[in-house]
Image: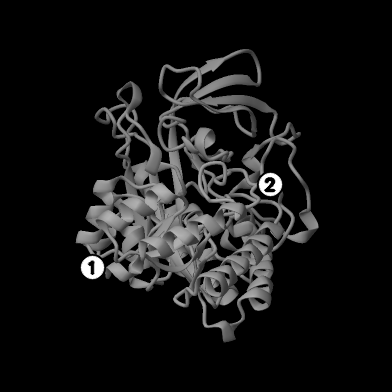
Amino acid sequence: MASVKDLKSSILDSVGLQPEKHNSTVNNGEYERTKAYNQYDLHHDQAHEQIFGALKNHIESVNKDTCDAGDENSFFVCDLGEIHRLYRYWCEKLPRVTPFYAVKSNPNPQVLKTLCELNANFDCASKSEIEKVLRLGAEPSRIIYANPCKASSFIRFAKQKNVRKSTFDNVEELHKIKRFHPESELLLRIATDDSTAQCRLSTKYGCSMEEVGTLLAKVEELGLNLVGVSFHVGSGASDFGSFEKAIRDARIVFDMATKKFGMEELHILDIGGGFQLESFEESSRVINAALEQYFPVSSEVEVIAEPGRYFAATAFTLACHVIAKNSHGKGDSMLYINDGVYGNMNCILFDHQTPIPRVLFHNSTFHYMDLETSSPILTQNCPNRVSIWGPTCDGLDCITDKYYMKYDLVVGDWLYFPNLGAYTSSAATPFNGFEQAVDIIYINSENL
């Protein structure tokens, strides 16, 4: 393991960044590493020491030759201190915007508890997610039911629990709400330009600007309470101008509702989710400028957002055991590990993520944060080409078809994958009998 003194550039890399002098773009789909953190090192030295300690202690407790079946399963290390730092960073960069954490990104109870204690609010999309949040002791007013198309029974459940804030984007939803929860505080979800997003959502949700008038008229006809406008520009957008355009469109809806329909109660703007840590500073600048132009502080509009990935991704590190190997000649092999696309790396299929494999344990030596042990491209330092596969019998279960390793890895070695907290465990399945109730080791690097 590299010494703490030598980890400065590694720390930036662990959250998907590199110092300016290392500017480069990897051509295999790995995200661009183009900006330093501007004096905001989220993963500080002590955090990495604690993460490494947790990984090391767990691996040393497993004897691969004598352990019970499943004892060598993959496992997570979750740093709750990272969530504290991310929350502070959010408040620093978007001081006007109240975060409603998207529970779907990672409904882990400790993550939810930490965010609840930090006074974050919650974006829920189902009965189960609402129940999880209410069990924390959070008030119903801290929840937005941000699913524009809900089952009638779920709407009745929201009424029973006094969850009032809710989104809609169609006439039929309004009729259900009128019948089952007429006290709802409604936000009209509008479609946005999410053409540059990795995960597009406007193909499924959001009314067009041409439909806004019809929906506002129906709200008025039914005597429902419209309190705001919401949108979502999609996850992984590369054009932050989509935020500016969506905020401008929201202003048009506010003005139409007030001037044409006399709806004076609008006071909430929900700018959705899609925030990523590596681009947060840039996206927050665009958002702040657009808010100042279209919804200045003097407008007294409450601005909220639905970040999920932002809070969850970098808080989790996944460790996996090499369970089998198929060699195809010198420096070319297939590695099989005990997690994959049906498990905690389903994000490869559903979320367009590219998990980064790094060597954790090889030849009785730990290599955490030694970033020269793996590479997406062939280098002199990493000559061993591997493909990495999950444990199921499906050929789709491939983590990467090509990566390069410094060492000729063998059965019994361990890999780790940083930044795997968002849209991973929340969508894992027990396909092929591989249960996904993996161990999670919690640390809090803020308690030092």
How many discs mark residues in the rendered view?
2
Q: Which mark is residue 429?
A: none
Badge 1 amino acid: Gly
Callout 1: 10 Å neighbours few (<14), some, many (20+)? few
Where in the figure is residue 220, as x and y percent of width and height?
Answer: 42, 65
Residue on which disc 2 sits: 196
Q: Residue at x 42, y 16 (%)?
A: 393
Q: Residue at 45% across / 18% down in the picture?
A: 394
Q: CA distance from mark 1 to mark 2?
A: 38 Å
State the residue in front, 170 or 195.
170
Camera-side residue of 275 and 313: 275
Q: Earlier in the sequence, mark 1 or mark 2?
A: 1
- Provide the residue designation for mark 1: 137
Quadrant in the rendering for residue 329: top right
Q: SS class of the residue under badge 2?
A: loop
Q: For the C terminus, which image quadrant?
A: bottom left
Q: Position of residue 262 (x, y in %)?
A: 49, 75
- Find the residue positioned furthest to the bottom: 298
**Does residue 306 appear anywhere in the picture?**
no
Label 1 or label 2, whichever lies nearer to me, is 2
Q: Judge whether 87 appears above or below 68 on screen.
A: below
Q: Is residue 53 above or below residue 327?
A: below
Q: On the rendered structure, is 127 left or right of 371?
A: left
Extreme residue toward the front, this view: 221
Which residue sits at x=69%, y=33%? 382
* Helix, strand or loop status at disc 1: loop
Q: Amino acid at mark 2?
A: Thr
Residue at 34% x, 34% y is 72
Tell me residue 426's x, y (percent).
38, 43
